[in-house]
Image (cartoon, helix red, strand yellow):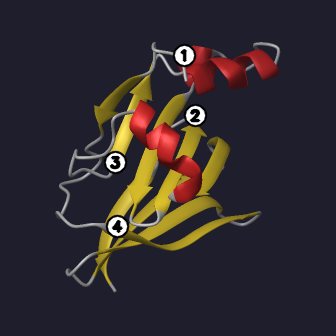
Amino acid sequence: MKKNNILKKWHPIEMIHGDLYLISLSYDQANGLEVSFEIENTGSKLLFDFGFHALYYQSQNENSSLKMIDDYSITGNNWSLFSVEKSDMIHWISKNSYNIISEEDILHFILLHADGLITILSGKEPKVSLTSL
């Protein structure tokens, strides 16, 4: 990973502290991309609805993402939701679209959970909701 990636804590809603446990990651023709987590010891579910704005997503288990976690200095943050500015992945997506998709129109999110991380590039911020399980 290049050094121009700037990781920032992302606060889409008032977070309840606790580890996130992946419930589901789904992409279908009816809803687009949705990711849901259980928040440890709360009985709450956190849902991210990217709809059809997601341009790219990748789910990695912890073992296959250790270097990325270290490169971004995610460990020890006691936080699970991040955005990335000056993202190399955004540059990559824009370049692969022959610049049809402008870098300024893409947002980069990292969702860290107990068993790995999910990387999402999207044209808009997701709808985020917190509900009871």
SS at mark 2?
Answer: loop
Residue placed under numbered mark 1 in the picture: 104
Residue at 17% across, 64% down: 16
Nearer-N-terminus badge (4/1): 4
Q: Position of residue 128 (x, y in %)?
A: 38, 57
Image point (25%, 50%), residue name = 79
Q: Which of the two labelled residues, at mark 3 and mark 1, occupies the earlier sequence position? A: 3
Per the model, the C-alpha gap separating discs 2 and 1 is: 9 Å
Q: Distance from label 3 to label 1 (Cα)?
A: 21 Å
**Closer to viewer: mark 2 or mark 4:** 4
Whether residues under marks 3 and 1 lie with C-beta atoms below 8 angstroms apart, the answer is no
Who comes first in sequence, dot 2 or dot 4? 4
Graded by Cα atoms within 10 Å as few (under 14), some (14 to 19) or many (20 or more), the crowding at tag 2 reads some
Note whether residue 125 is visible: no
Q: Is tag 2's residue or tag 1's residue first in the polypeptide sequence?
A: 1
Question: Which quarter of the image is occupied by the N terminus?
Answer: top right
Callout 4 crowding tier (Cα within 10 Å): few <14, some 14–19, many ≥20? many
Q: CA distance from mark 3 to mark 4?
A: 10 Å
Picture quadrant where residue 63 is located:
bottom right
From the viewer's perspective, is 116 left or right of 77? right
